[in-house]
Amino acid sequence: MEFRTVSTLDEALAELDERGGDTAVLAGGTDFTIQYLRGELRPASVLHIERVEQLKSVTNGSGLRLGALVTHRQLSTDAQVVRHASAVAEAAATVGGWQTMAVGTVGGNVCNASPAADVVPALLVHEAEAVLASKQGGERRVPLDRFILGRRRVDRRPTELLASLALAAPPPRTGDAYVKVGRRGAMEIAIVGLAARLTFDESGVVRDARLAVGSMASTAVRLPTAESALVGTSLDSGALDEAGRLLLEAVNPIDDVRGSAAYRRAVAPRVLARAAELCRQRALAGA
Amino acid sequence: MQLTLTINGRDHQTDVPVGSTLLQVLRDELRLTGTKEACVEGECGACTVLLDGNPLDSCIYLAHAAAGRSVTTVEGLVRSDGVLSDLQQAFLECGGVQCGFCTPGLLVTLSAFLDSGAEPTREAVTRSIVGNLCRCTGYSQVVDAVQLAAERRAAGR
Amino acid sequence: MTVIGTAVVRTDGEAKVRGDALYTVDLEVAGQLHGRLLRSPVPAGVIRYLDTTAARALPGVRAVLTAADAPAVRAGWLVKDQVLFASDRIRFEGEPIAAVAADTVEEAQAAVDAIVLEIEELPAVCDLEAALDAGAPLIHPDWERYETDLPPFPRRGNLACEMVSDPPGVDEAFARADFVVEGEYRADRQYQAYLEPKSTVAVYEDGRFIVHTGSQYPFNVRDRVAQFLDVRPSAVRIVGHHIGGGFGAKLDAALEPYAALLARATRRPVRLANTRAEDLLTCPSRENAIVRIRSAVTKTGEIIGRDVVCYMDNGAYCGEMPLMPGLPLHMAGANYRVGPTRVISRLVYTNTTPTGAFRGVGGTYCCFAVERHMDDIADRLGVDRREFRLRHLFEDGDRLLNGQPLDDAGILREAFDAVEERAPWKTLAAPNGRYRGVGLAAATWLVNPMPASVTLRLNDDGTVGLITAANDNGSGAVHTGLVQILADEFGVSPTDVIVNAPDTDLAGYDAGSQGSRTTHVVGRATQEAAANLKRAIADVAATLLEAAPDDIEIRSGGAHVRGVPSRVVSLSEIGRASKATTGTLTGSGNYASPLPEFNPACASGLLFPCLWTPSYHVHLAEVEVDPVTGNVHVLRYVVAQEVGRAINPVAVAGQIQGGVAQGLGYTLFENLRIEDGRYVERTLENYRLPVAVDIPPVEAIVLEHAFAEGPHGARGVAEPPILPVAAAIGNAVSHAIGQPITKIPITPEDVLAALASPGRNGSRR
């Protein structure tokens, strides 16, 4: 196995252009290295991009732009992320311990495409787009729900690098939240991880709803039917029940070692209601 | 593949295969056995070291990714005169050490916590060490130790 | 000023915080090879084909051993039912089939992978009750031929041990009862999950085996290695090292006999170390169990009789498990007067990993069952749960079901009172309009009585050398407890007590760090040894001081002539003088706890006859349940614990906090489920140990009623804090949700299911 460390984006893209085929891109490596040690990954070469400074910042223009190498620790504490995408900060704060958060990156989390990735549902409700760069093709933008194709499968071409994630700017009176179900108070892989972003009008009626849930299907998924059920309502229990019911229609949870499908089904609608309520509180607090 | 690391302030050159973890280099190549291996999946934190001041699990960090950077292990936590750090001393006094196998990792993480200047509330301290499993102490005396060390630091300033 | 009762810093602490302390996994012996084991991938089956030819031919491989290369013997702690390698029948997943030694771990693993193995898989026997059915396949068809040093006890087929106590009056009590309350309580296994996975390095030299290992019980490992290798015990020397946690799982041999066999075969030192996954898979975890209790109750609220049946999972081999069926007898009728009680406990062979000791052996789930049952009865009667306990509470002189009198059982009431003072029950138990609940549980527990031997020597620099096979498992019982006892005896600094690492060639027999025994039992032996060393010192000092030996007093680091303050000679002077005259001064001492009064005819199969050195415990837990997820949050945890004397208050607090934390893990987080003979949870990602944010600081109230036989009155401290945790939390959660919890661990799924069940008792809130 070859190992190359690059320190600029141009170097990284040049390397990928030259030998993209069987190259694994390594950032913090918290997922990669475990899979490598288990023998699940055996790439011919590793491109270590962790030191590319251009990919480490959070900027805010017409929406947040998260560099692919922004760590979970950065995400969880960055003032702009906390302010404009608290669901993302909340989700990042639950990704393992300090040791994982300090090196694990948002780009890595997205590209690892675990069905249980915490940050992904939060990014989905913020309409994130994967911004891909390549030496020949320039920039390509793919909505995140289309970028993630399945468990550990993403729409990244061998010569491309995930450079950043572009989030939509939330309208006024918007609140967002990420609610995670796990056994312990930390160090949990989500049994259910649900993100919500709700926008309210002045009378407290939901004008826009985005919901996404992880660990309930082979990838994290948006929940358009459940979203529709909330729009135009004041989050009364009937609406929440209906959204919960539609959530369950849209997912296909399995029994695994962390939790049964029955538990996931029992808990997900309740978590939806909890997340929606948090969105309301935050939207009103911000209004 | 050649690898240069600065470990506890000293440069080390070694030649290890790509795919070696930082922990393997520390323990097997350099025989710095203070850093412990206990799960090799990033769950327990016994292998925690600082890389340029940030704690990480050296069992799941590739050694070559750390090339040229500065690594601090438990052996590097003592003061430059060889005396125990305030945190190490407080661990002894407060009962933060029992079997001692998780202790190096805890000390490394908590050194970073103290250096961050964060308020050492019980909530903040316990939150900082969720990635460090301890099976003996139930964590309480570890928190006591951090608070004692922080108090002494504050008083010393 | 004495150091007894003070927070002396543990004398191995500095090495541990510096990272200098060498554990077994850190050892490297010159020329060592690396071993790996081929373990069975299935829980039950028959080996049809085993070929090591290809493995032997691989580079770096020095030996590939199978049953054909090992002595044809059976070994075992209590029953010789174990073989070193499976050769025909596979009895559990992870059972060793072959062992490889090679120049590197990778080469050893490659050789393991190259062994050709064909197994005809058979259905795994793992249902505890079905395993005892007449037609059930036998795990050990040859069970009758297995030897044991124990007196005969009831066992047959898959029933590894049966304990029956059937006193007169039980059926009469049920006939007389106004109603009967019944309950079934279940518990899964619990993995000790010490941070240091098991490892060993074995050296073969002069026909003897030198085995390095971080064992809790070096002499037991010595005996097992000797049995498996079919050599006399003194042909094995166990050298102990710092232990990265054990909690009962490092009492018996694990990797040591394989490393010894490989070392002999290769004439090279051989290191073996478990991966975490191997360690979890093969560790003698706390047994899963089923406890059924029926109580005969009068309408005035008196329990007048009880009937208990307990099934315990032995796994594939016995280890020390045949002792365990005695525990339900001691737990079923302790703390509270419950009338004549019948107890039947059955230890059952299954196609699963052999179970073993874990802090609070056999007690945690019995305490859970009995204390949950007490709440169930109180709820049925509609009376206050605390009042109900106090009404039945033991007093001084009440007897356990084995007839053992507890002269100081009145301490239980003090413990209830102490908890009440800290956390008033009426306030906590009142309806709160939320999913909050409170639970109480009590326990009476023992100190392991087995023998200790200690030798002390006065070194020529005046320090005191402590030679013992008692190992400090992390509790501090050696590095604070024994050290403080010696520092007190001789009036020296704790740092002037030099603790020798356990070495079975040097130290006398010691029964290991188990059952809270080190401070109490080894402490007493240490005091005996100190008295003998003092006599030897006094003889030398008498000459130096020109006084009669009887007039010499050893204190403050020197020998003093009584009543003449100016006539004193320091221990270092005496040490130097002895080097030139008498030779090194030594003193040895032995101690084992005496057998308490009890009725040996109370039961059959009672291999664990009584509760030596009893201590008393009351725990209170306050929890809040998240009705959305079913998660349980522990808001508050109060412990009142009788310790006799806290030799080191910080160490005692650490044992209580740590024991409760393990209990909370057992109760709320640590699933170790078995499906078709296999563990479902196989890594630390899925086997969830509690993390720092899950454990509240325990409010510990330490009661100190000196126990006459203990050193400075000390009883034992380490085991009991785990005992009542599942019970107290189970009672609190049941209170919070208005539904009885009957299973450990209490999962969010269980809680949510209980909340959804129609019979919920809403009146609680």
Image: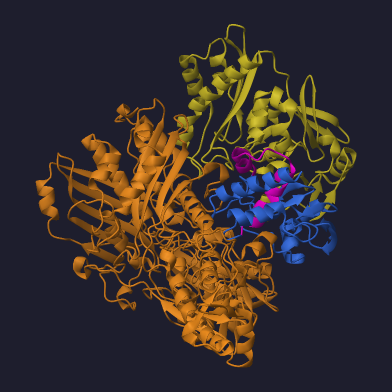
Q: Which of C59 and C312 is in front in this view?
A: C312
Q: Which of C531 and C143 is in front in this view?
A: C531
Counting from the top left corner in percent of width and height, residue C408 is at 30, 58
Chain A drawn in what color? yellow
Residue B103 among magenta residues: yes
Residue C408 in the figure: left or right of residue C715: left
Whether A32 is drawn above or below C762: the answer is: below
Chain B drawn in what color? blue
Q: In this view, which residue lies farthest toward the top?
A: A203
Chain C drawn in what color? orange
What stretch of residues is rendered in magenta?
B101-128
Q: Tell me if I can see residue A41 in this picture.
A: no
Whether A281 is drawn above or below C595: the answer is: above
Whether A272 is drawn above or below C111: the answer is: above
Q: Tell me if I can see residue C706 in this picture.
A: yes
The quadrant in which the N terminus of chain C is found is bottom right
Q: Residue drawn at (52%, 15%), measured in percent from left and top? A: A235
Residue B91 in the figure: left or right of residue B85: left
Quadrant of residue C763 in the image? top left
Counting from the top left corner in percent of width and height, residue C179 is at 15, 41
